[in-house]
Amino acid sequence: MNIKILGGENEIGGNKILIEHKETRIFLDFGMSFKQASKYFSEFLQPRKCASLTDFYEFKLLPRIRGVYRLDYLKHMERRNESRGIDAIFLTHAHADHAQYIHFLRDDIPIYCTKATKIILQTLEETGSNSLSDFITSCDAFTFRENTKGGLSRVTRKDKEYVKERQYNIMEPDKKVRIGSLDIEMVPVDHSLPGACGFIIYSDEGNVVYTGDIRFHGSNQELSKKFIEKAKKSKPKWLLCEGTRINQTEMDSENGVKAKISQIISESKGLVFVEHPIRDTDRVNSIFQATKENKRTFVVNMKLAYLISKLGDLAPFNLEKVKILIPKKSWGLIDKEGIEKCHIEQDYETWEREYIGRDNSITYKELKQNPKKYVVSMSMWELTQLVDIKPEDAIWIKSSCEPFCEEMELDEERKKNWLKHFKIKEYFAHASGHATGPEIREMIKEIKPEILIPIHTEHKELFKDN
Ligand SMILES: [Zn+2]
Ligand SMILES: [Zn+2]
């Protein structure tokens, strides 16, 4: 058995783990390294599309391995065709630091993950502005097609025959998947994203346990405890263990976050805005419950509405239970009288249009008229809406992590200027998606692997005692 850490060592995220056993090769996660990417690139200094994989290779954002990458990209780099060298890829969850770079993978590599992970990746592909989001389908890049005038046009996503479905396989708990000489079991865990899981890989040379990202203080904490039980039972030779917060002891609690948000709302005299990770449905539910406790109504944006409807049964509540805020976009026709729906719609993306004119959709006007009735989900990218709402006595609850790079600090600073301008007081209520040092040590002690491999951590040295 060969276990190669091609990303995620000595850093938080960017996990890319290659497992080789006899003739079988699988990947566990194929994420983006924020640390490495932000060292060389920024919003206005991006890897060039024309360079295909070259810019990514240059700065070790992608490992140079054969049989893994998309043929359209390789062809553009004038590389010879290569045959598929990977049997499958297994995703622990849909966070970018674990899944973003599947964009670069060949479309014939089977992808194994949970149902929620696939749904989140699908909403990211459909609603995202990121150009590296060929998650569910891949569209041939650098390809011409013959047009109706007999000339050549560049292929776009509208040319359906050039868009290929990736091969997804939904994993269920307690059901192993056989890939070559390996059996892989998906075990759900608690994390700040629905559908998160770890894996146990069974082989005749010993078993591998991979935690993915894990915590013990969310509303699915029972899952993480069961994960430890299962992992222990497998008597693993290797444990790939995340250590984001190995250097921290402060215990978090999602329940505590809910109680704190509820308390802050109860003392507020105006509109309440909450800034939170939009796909963390555990947090979304905490805010929803806190809102209900205060007899207010939760207002979500269109992206969150889309995610909730796509998640269906896996969502914490039904879309009918909340209001959907339709922002002014482009020409801003939504608040003008006597405009036909078909003209208003042109301001919005196709996927957004189904939310216009619904019984539970509202605009800034309603928030302006009845501020005390609502708690509004809002990110710093939607701040311009404050100009329309002109809130009085409003508050802002930051329910997300602190900035961890310079770019984020600048964004945060700018947000604070907006809040100051509108005299909005800011509060904080957040719990992490990761276990603390003592919890991780306890987990390792329970699972008792022969070999411990720290991953997703900047403090490998703190695992020494284990
Ligand atoms: Zn992660
Ligand atoms: Zn994560």
Image: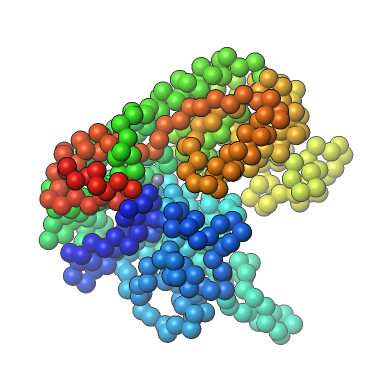
In the picture, residue 413 is in which quadrant?
top right
In the picture, residue 291 is in which quadrant?
top right
Q: Left of 267 or right of it: where is 252?
A: left
Residue appearing at x 37%, y 67% in the figure? 63
Task: Please state the horizontal and vertical placement of residue 446, each as a whole percent of the image.
Answer: 16, 38
Tell me the quadrant of the picture where the N terminus can be found.
bottom left
Residue appearing at x 39%, y 55% in the figure? 14
What residue occupies the far right of the structure in this picture? 338
Above or below, 71 relative to 301: below
**Residue 392 seen in this snapshot:** yes
Q: Nearer the viewer, residue 23 or 169?
A: 23
Residue appearing at x 44%, y 39% in the figure? 314
In the picture, residue 163 is in which quadrant?
bottom right
Q: Left of 61 or right of it: where is 273?
A: right
Above or below, 2 relative to 376: below
Q: Nearer the viewer, residue 185 or 456?
A: 456
Tell me the quadrant of the picture where the C terminus can be found.
top left
Task: Please state the horizontal and vertical placement of residue 6, each as a whole percent of the image.
Answer: 32, 62
